[in-house]
Amino acid sequence: AQPGSPSPVPAKLRDLQWGKLNFLHTTDTHGWLGGHLQEASYSADWGDYVSFVTQMRRKAESQDADLLVIDTGDRVEGNGLYDSSDPKGKYLYDILKQQDIDVMSSGNHELYKQNTSEAEFLTNVPNFQGSYLASNIDIYDPQSGKLVALGPRYKKFTTKNQAIRIVAFGFLFDFTGNYNNTKVQPVEETVREDWFQEAIRETEVDLFLVVGHVPLRSQEYQAVYNAVRRLHPDVPIQFFGGHLHVRDYARYDTKSSGLASGRFMETIGFLSIDNVKSSNPVFSRRYIDNNLFSYHHHAGLDEATFPTEHGKNVSRMIQEARHALDLDMVHGCAPRDLWVSRTPYPSSDSIYSWLENEVLPQSLRDPLRNNTPALAISNTGAIRFDIFKGPFTQDSIYNMSPFTSGFRYIKDVPLKTAKRLVWLLNRETKIFTESEHQNYCPLGPPEKCAHDLDIETRRYTPINSELKRREQIVLSPEVEQDPQVLPGYTTIDDAGNDGDDTIHSSISFYDVPNVLQTLIVPETTLSAKENTSTEPSTVDLVYVDFIEPYIALAAKFSGLHVELPRDSDVYMSGTSLTELILGWIKDNWRCDKTFI
Ligand SMILES: O=c1ccn([C@@H]2O[C@H](COP(=O)(O)O)[C@@H](O)[C@H]2O)c(=O)[nH]1
């Protein structure tokens, strides 16, 4: 763990049920390779995980079993270790490659920007040669300019100890927000390609392994499942998924299942399959809290015997990178916790209410607009993580707001129309049904999308469904706090409620809107007539530039006749949302002696 990170609190643990074939799985790590420096439950770093994999491989060997290590993408964007270096990822790729990963795939965050996907192609794919699969992604090779596969489409291999013959694929969901230097083929089309049809016609196979940055309960995985099952009614299929940032386990039939292992290095997913080659395979899953207490327990080792030299070196690499990036530098001290979804919105401890009521009204102003009133909009997904009371560091800013988006505006928009546009963005259905940008919750945080699962059937409710959205639901009721049991994940999945390794009390999650809004009316701009209603008749409609495609769509439905980007312009040139928030924090959150 990194120096200064909190020690894990001993807790009641559930053991792992080993099989002859075992997996460890990470997904959506988003650069959190240093672990969580403010949360004891998730305080192990990538170096500890390197030690854990080594020790678990030894344990597998001793039982003549196999262990495969999987990662399903979104390794970048979301933490200072990736986002604060120039170029981004200067330290991350070398740290990542220290892990011995057997099968991995790309996420959507590897493809939003040209430099990220090129780093993936030129650095990460070669670093993980033989493991990195890209079943449905192509990239324009920056050297030749030719469109080529990002990585091999699939691979066949046989495990060392049990000689299990595996055919593996690596998918990304039907993502449309990628920069134009990559092409993502919809999974439903990929499964009709000749190479895929040939691959699944393999007869010498004991297991199909489908890894991907794909929600488990999705039309994409349904398509892969249907294609394989049509030819192989009896061969086990194991899926690993991600993107929604949740722990989840799905049973598709008696011989197939899927595991999703959370987000931000909070969770290491464990899955075992016993009797893979028989007519009766047995599956077991566990979500391991990423801390040393859990690691020691599951490896059957202690503080002295657990860490490997390699693991310790990787922890040192992280420490040096964090030091070089000055990630512990304190910008201010937060006077209270501010939550993304642990508290109702709006409320005094909602991070979105804080942005709407304090940060944006006090900071968002373009001097070139001469105090013109503005209705400002940001997507809630731009804010990725909570703020904890106490020191707010260089790391905290990227954990909370990692993206580089700035602002644009459309002038002279009737306030009534602007408000209707916001209403439409939050209502979603109509807009996204007709959108080429349809995606998993393209505006809100991914967890919001996961919570739109139909509770009864555990099926994902597509965002173009006409099903009525729940307004704001408490997903798990608060329970009396048992002093021995700390709050944390209490997952319910298709195998029941005993998946988490650590026994926790539950935390409440509340739904959040797609976009937050704030009306900014400088006193002096109101005419005497308007002053009576305190609302201007027209405003600058200001928005985070990432959401411009959705603004264009919502404008169409709200009667705002604009063509974007032609009719919009940059607002506060050179200032990103992240810089705006950081500036406000530096000005407003002084550290007094209660924090030191
Ligand atoms: O530049 C960006 C990129 C993404 N977002 C938001 O992030 C989510 C997607 O996050 P995942 O980790 O891939 O699930 C997307 O819905 C956007 O809301 C952003 O705001 N800016």
Image (cartoon, rainbow, N blue to C red):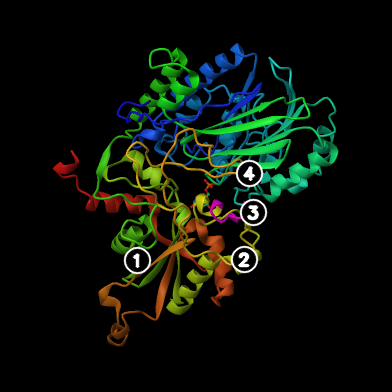
Q: Amino acid at mark 3?
A: Thr
Report which residue position mark 4 lands on: 214
Mark 1 lies on a secondary structure that is helix
Residue 71 is situated, as x and y percent measured from the top left of the image, at 58, 32
Q: Quadrant of residue 526?
A: bottom left
Q: CA distance from mark 2 to mark 1?
A: 44 Å
Q: Amino acid at mark 2?
A: Leu
Packing grade of label 1 (10 A; few <14, some 14-19, many >=20) is: few
Residue 322 is situated, as x and y percent measured from the top left of the image, at 36, 30
Give the mark nearer the N terminus: 4 vs 2: 4
* Disc sitting over residue 467 in the figure: 2
Asked if residue 569 is positioned above or below residue 243 in the image, the reply reads below
* Disc sitting over residue 69 in the figure: none
Q: Quadrant of residue 66?
A: top right
Asked if residue 396 is positioned above or below residue 407 in the image, the reply reads above
Report which residue position mark 1 lands on: 368
Q: Amino acid at mark 1?
A: Leu
Q: Which residues are magenta?
A: 450-460
Q: Is residue 576 visible?
A: no
Q: CA distance from mark 3 to mark 1?
A: 53 Å
Confirm or deny contact between disc 3 and disc 2 (CB under 8 A): no
User: 511 or 519, which lies in front?
Assistant: 511
For the residue with label 3, is its CB less than 8 Å from the closest atom of ligand 1? Answer: no
Furthest toward the bottom, the residue is: 529
